[in-house]
Amino acid sequence: MRTLADVAAGRPWTESPPWRVTASRPESRDTVTLELEPPEPFSFQPGQFNMLRVPGIGEVPISISGDPSAAGAVLHTIRDVGAVTHALCESRPGHQIGVRGPYGTSWPVQAAEGGDVVIVAGGIGLPPLRPAIYHVLAHRESFGRLVLLYGARTPSDLLFTSELGTWRSRFDLTVEVTVDTAGRDWHGNVGVVPDLIGRAAFDPGKSVAFTVGPEIMMRFAVRALLAAGVPEDRVFLSMERDMQCAAALCGHCQLGPFLVCRDGPVFCYRPLARWLGVREL
Amino acid sequence: MPQTLEHVLRGHEFFAGLDPEYFALIAGCARNVVFGDGTFLFREGDPAQTFYLVREGAVGLEITAPGRVLTVQTIGAGEMVGFSWLMGPHRWQFDGRAVGRVHAIEMDGACLRAKCDADPRLGYDLMQRFANLATRRLQATRLQILDVYGHAHTG
Amino acid sequence: MSVLGRSELDRLLDAIRRRGFRLIGPVLEDGAICYGDISSAADLPAGWTDEQDAATYRLRRRDDQALFGYNVGPQSWKKYLFPATARLGAPAGPDGSERFAFIGVRACELRAIAIQDRVFTGGRHADPGYAANREGAFIVAVNCGQAASTCFCTSMSAGPRAERGFDLALTELLDAGGHRFLIEAGTPRGAEVLAEAGASPAPTGDVTAADAIIERTTAAMGRSMPELDLRDLLYDNLEHPRWDDVAERCLACGNCTMVCPTCFCFSVEEVTDLAGTDAEQQRSWDSCFTLDHSYLHGGPVRTSSKSRYRQWMTHKLATWHDQFGTSGCVGCGRCITWCPVGIDITEEVAAIAADA
């Protein structure tokens, strides 16, 4: 039977049908979550991304940040860093955005069943992890502990703060938040995200860890996870490179032997390790 | 007459105040090294079993991300670089690159640890030495991240 | 095996054209042998040959009227299958109905086409533009009668004999027996066209003569790629000092990526009309030698020309295996010929291997 992924693969990669913006919600001073209504049924795996196109301006890969089991509008969280993302952040309900996808590999949530799940997110790294969190919460009895360690530069850069508060108040999920620097109004933790790993309670021998953030932060987080005893093949990262086609055709997203749009963006740390240390790869 | 390793160690600031009778002992774990400008003394992720006493030149501690090479600190003449040999997983946490031609003494960590195991008094002195330096570096790093020239303290 | 005289060659070309194909073949242009539209054998560069070496390309007159007495020039068939600029998704030709017949495709080029077939149509997402251009293309291959000093197809197992992927394969014979072509049919439609052109069964002597020519060409390769596992060699030597050495010579001009028949990187841009109401996406050739190619977060990942040369060479010879299952290099030597400073990919590999 053809899956929706097959259908997506079957439609030419060169077409991005228009989806309507149904909501736009600012998350922080430079980040917005857009809700886009697909013209036909759409499904995705946690960790995957769509290519969003603003005709006349350009097209960019954006992580899908919503609940994979929810029908209806699909959530995309976008940080304003250039012309296309700026146009996306400026979009309002009723606008049309060209969308194609989903693309890429996903968080191995099935393989994680039966053990603890440790999620380490830095800055704009939380949106591509949120679908995995939703998945674990929706199938809570299949997993052990769920730990979310999240950090940003300053308190005003934290995303999904009200949802973090809701999660925090649950008893079946641990949430620790930190910022690199803060003023007097912040009464929470100050320090780097990787340092939260050593203090978190989870069984490293029976855990899977997912981490996304700036590359340096991910490298330090991976170091801390390995030092805590999580095996190399149970640590997963989401990598980023320039993507123009997302279809393994244009050659831009190469990372050594890997094509990030096809072999990633979610990678197991072990096969990736030797390539992460190479300068200007 | 060329200086002996022992002589050089006696004169290096890092070992200032060390009981004089120990220099002959630790010289057995030392060797002279020279690095050309821009060459790497060590690379992030490589096994770390040594530390360096810089005599001339400077060592830049660097970390890379796509499109950027960041220097987090430079360690100059009279200073010491290398803490990773002291504790697991014994891997360098940063790249160390010579800024200008670098003359240094390379100390063999395993050799030194063995001598400390045999003589705890030496071990205690070295631990204090490293702890003091680490504390000073930590204060400096804290000051660095406060970004005092920028827009810190945003709440 | 069949044989067709030089004066009958046009019957073959006509038979192909009658089937609705646009004939493309080697033509003299701007002091080089390039690819362009042809209508008959008279349009081919008869009596010309090329002299190639690192950073060197010259045309020279032959003392015979051979039609294919040269090797490959600065262009490759990607000029038509994967044009330098195109509207995204659209095939070549005004209404997308163009069907190409490529006349004079060398063995290295057959391999290059197969490599690009894998990139553009062999993965999960095929490229509709390439697929449309490639669909049903009629291929008349030619077995090389000479090797340039920059050729090394044998050490890449990509020639000089055309093995597969053609409708017809010609070997040009020009000797006491006259000027004629030994022709092998590779497909039923190739055989049909051959019959229509009135080719006759080839005498054994012609088959032997053709084999001898191909053997002579095989032995005459100007260069060779060291016989090593290039993937392992390059993966283990990403920080080899030779990269600094080549970086001092490389201009990052990107010529190699333009002339290489397998290079496929492209960029996608929005193109709007003056009114700003209509926008379409255009794709154009890109090169990993540009700073833009690895752009991320306000800057390129590969800033130094050293890292960009390393990217190109390790992609071509090593990471291509992991990405697409084969080498990306066919040994055509174009990158050596057209590099303005004469960087030789086989020499760079040998230098790294020498003290890996």
Image: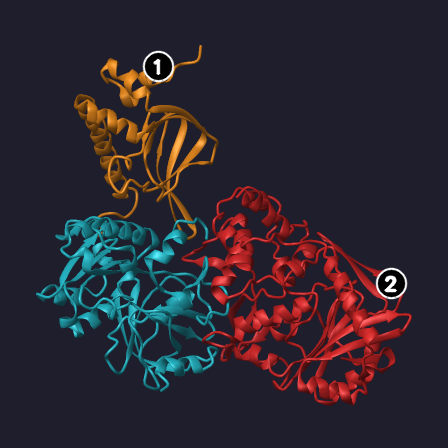
Amino acid at pointer 1 = His
Chain at tag 2: C
**Residue A51 x/y as whole percent:** 40, 73
User: Which residue corresponds to the image point at 24% horizontal and 69% vertical from the top-left?
Assistant: A132
Q: How is the image coloured?
A: by chain
Real-space Cα separation, disc 2 to disc 1, in angstroms? 77 Å
How crowded pointer 2 is (Cα within 10 Å; few <14, some 14-19, many 20+) is rated as: some
Which colour is chain B painted? Answer: orange
Chain at tag 1: B
The residue pinned by badge 2 equals C62
Left or right: C156 as drawn, with respect to B32: right
Closer-to-camera residue (C181/A166): C181
Closer-to-camera residue (C229/A41): C229
The residue pinned by badge 1 equals B7
Q: Is residue A139 above or below residue A253?
A: below
Tell me the quarter of the picture where residue C203 sits: bottom right
User: Which residue corresponds to the image point at 61% horizontal and 79% vertical from the top-left?
Assistant: C134
Residue C67 in sight in this render: no
Query: Chain letter for cyan?
Result: A
Q: Secondary structure at mark 1?
A: helix
Callouts 2 and 1 on one subunit = no
Point out which mark residue C42 bears.
none
Q: Is residue B81 above or below residue A105?
A: above
Q: Give yes or no for contact between labels 2 and 1 (Cβ–Cβ under 8 Å).
A: no
User: Which residue corresponds to the image point at 87% horizontal and 80% vertical from the top-left?
Assistant: C7
User: Which residue corresponds to the image point at 72% horizontal and 88% vertical from the top-left?
Assistant: C192
**Residue C307 x/y as whole percent:** 51, 50
- Report the quarter where the N terminus of chain A lies: bottom left
Query: Chain letter for red?
Result: C
Q: What is the residue that sits farthest to the front in this orientation?
A: C204
